[in-house]
Image: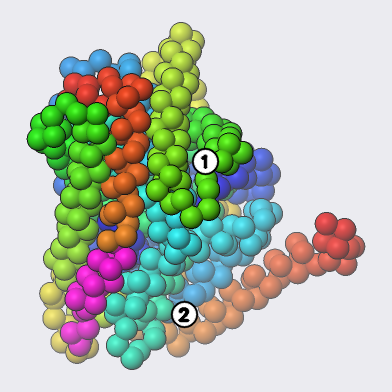
Amino acid sequence: MDIGIIDYYANSGKSFLHRALPFYKMISIALVLLSIVITSDFIVLLSIYLMLTGLVILTRLPFFKIISIAAYPAIFALLFAISSLNGDWIMPATIVLKALDAALAMVILITTTPYPSVFATLSPFLPRLILEGLYLTYRSLFILLGLMGNLFRALKVRGGFGQRSYIKNVRNFASGIGLLLIRGLDLSERLYGVMQVRGYGGRMADENSERRFTQKDILPLAIGLFIFGVSLGARLEEGFSQYGIYLLLFSIVFILTLAFYFYAPNIIRGVFWKR
Amino acid sequence: MSHIHIPDGVMPIWFVLAGWAATAVILYFCMRRVRDVELGRKIPLIGIVSALMILGMTLDIIPIAYHINMSVIAGIVLGPALGFISIFIVDLIISMFGHGGVTVVGLNTLIVGTEAMLGFYFFRVFLGVFGAGRLSPGMSAALAAVLSLIISTCLMIGVVYISQINPERVLHVHKENPLGKIFSLEPEGENKRHKIEDKRIDIETFAKTVFSLGVFGWILEGVITGFVIRYVSRVRPDLVLSEVT
């Protein structure tokens, strides 16, 4: 998983979700997560997944990359699903689908919102030590990513990873991690010192971000509310399942329309072929 | 292999909330413990150790999402209290890109945090046993990692067992109970109209799968932890044998 690319997507995108305020996006994602928690209807969960997939298209981010990042937890869910196999496929499929839905919702949030903005929104609920830890961890991630690339390249070039010399490889890999820890700590200490000299006192500038509801926040919130409403309906009304198929059809039409609208012009004009 | 990678919405709500509550209490005590410590130097260390753990967790050794945790390294370098705080930070961040459910961050922190805390104490005990030899820090760290991972994996299986996960029951709608219509708060609640079969997760199959996959992970993580701590103790012994925080 490339953390650097996730951060790049969050900072470089210009879609409606990128422009919406993190506070309302987080409310919307929280509603989607709540929907996933309360619903157990396979059709509803599948429809939610398709709708979220539609949102990925709307963000104009690389579609398959986002879907593949969000598919990661399905591996673990499979372990769980296999343990609950009893001849019926719906139950394991529901477990896997819940994992996929929740992961895709979170990945949409994190690829459209920079981490510091997410932390800033969470700041009223977190103690200062944890908040500072979150910021420094985020910054340290990129320090380490930079160091790691160079370090492992140097190890390879100098014969640090040989064929069939497993013990030597593990020792060199571990020494590399030790070196990363020490070099990273030096750089992180220097960064923290610079931040303090510049007046850092435990709060980031972005922390007092605006929370005024504007037009650009309507759509993300409406999507969250719609998904939550559908899940609540499925939970409360026994007869809801007969309408589930219409919801599924709606989701399929939604995703096909978006795919046609966003990708068809590129295919017709040959942009993909040029790439 | 000691994480709970259970999807959101499968664990009973009462258990998820209990996990969050226990984590909050432990975090409170951890923060009280480090109240008098000079945190100016410790915060960058928390940042770098947490970042290292995140990178470790996102690097698949085998392409079935099999990764190292480095939580024992965090415990040894940061100490039990700061180690637990660091684990919470890591779990919170990785849950944001779908690595483990968001609702189970509390339970995840308890399990991986236990790993870090035990790792620290085991390391100190083994260090006392092996004395001041050249290989002592590495050996102590490796053994501490293996022991902590075994215990945390047992804890994870215990959590799954205690939660009485029965997907049929948890995913089922309790139509008679108005609150239960939304959340299945009663794990053992009987539904009169819908006979729920006892289709719990087969804990034996689950444990066998986790242990058979885990044993390689424990050894690998133990070896890597040993070498990392051996290296750090030679270059920066102050990081490994610092004050207990």
Residue found at x 46% / y 8%? A197
Query: In whole angstroms, how far apart are the C-alphas of marks 2 and 1?
Result: 52 Å
Amino acid type, callout 2: Ile
Q: Secondary structure at mark 1?
A: loop
Residue found at x 64% / y 70%? A255
Q: Position of residue A180 (x, y in %)?
A: 45, 31
User: Disc 1 marks which residue?
Assistant: A160
* In the image, residue A84 above or below residue B56: below
Extent of the magenta region? B196-214
Q: Nearer the viewer, residue A274 or A234?
A: A274
Q: Quadrant of the N terminus of chain B?
A: bottom left
Q: Quick one: label 2, few (<14), some, or many (20+) residues within 10 Å?
A: some
| Residue B201 is one of the magenta-drawn residues | yes
Q: Nearer the viewer, residue B194 or A238?
A: B194
Q: Secondary structure at mark 2?
A: helix
Q: Is residue A144 visible?
A: yes
